[in-house]
Image (cartoon, grey):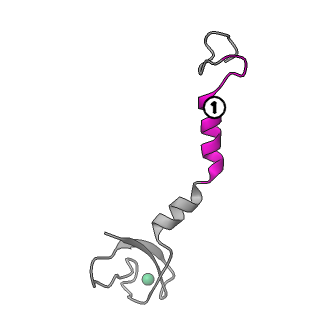
Amino acid sequence: MPIYEYKCNACGKNFETLVMGSSTPECPSCDSQDLSRLMSACGFISKSSGPSGETQVKSAGSSACGSCSSSNCSSCGVG
Ligand SMILES: [Zn+2]
């Protein structure tokens, strides 16, 4: 079931709601049906996760030590 984000044109409240079939959503604050549909929550979440976070996790976990092949550096004492 898709979740859409709406902005109420009557009172200006932003809210998310499930939209099933041909049902018309209403503002939970003032019960108005004069709404503007905004970007979906899914698109907003995928945008917020940047590549910088993934790079940091990879560099820290794959090869922590530069002088040996160990991943946890328990043998050479660097980590
Ligand atoms: Zn409203």
**Displayed quadrant of residue 58:** top right
Q: Dot 1, how many residues are within 10 Å of its Cα: few (below 14), some (14-19), or many (20+)?
A: few
Residue in view at x 34 percent, y 81 percent = 25
Q: How far from the left and from the top, in percent, is residue 16? A: 41, 71
Q: Nearer the viewer, residue 38 or 76?
A: 76
Determine if the magenta segment contains residue 64: yes
Q: Residues in magenta?
A: 50-68
Q: How far from the left and from the top, in percent, is residue 29? A: 40, 78
Residue in view at x 51 percent, y 60 percent = 45
Left or right, 19 with reference to 71: left
Q: How far from the left and from the top, in percent, is residue 36? A: 47, 85
Determine if the magenta segment contains residue 17: no
**Displayed quadrant of residue 66:** top right
Residue in view at x 53 percent, y 60 percent = 46
How many badges with numbers are in the image? Answer: 1
Vertical comparison of 59 with 64: above or below: below
Is disc 1 placed on a helix, strand or loop?
Answer: helix
Residue in view at x 32 percent, y 85 percent = 24
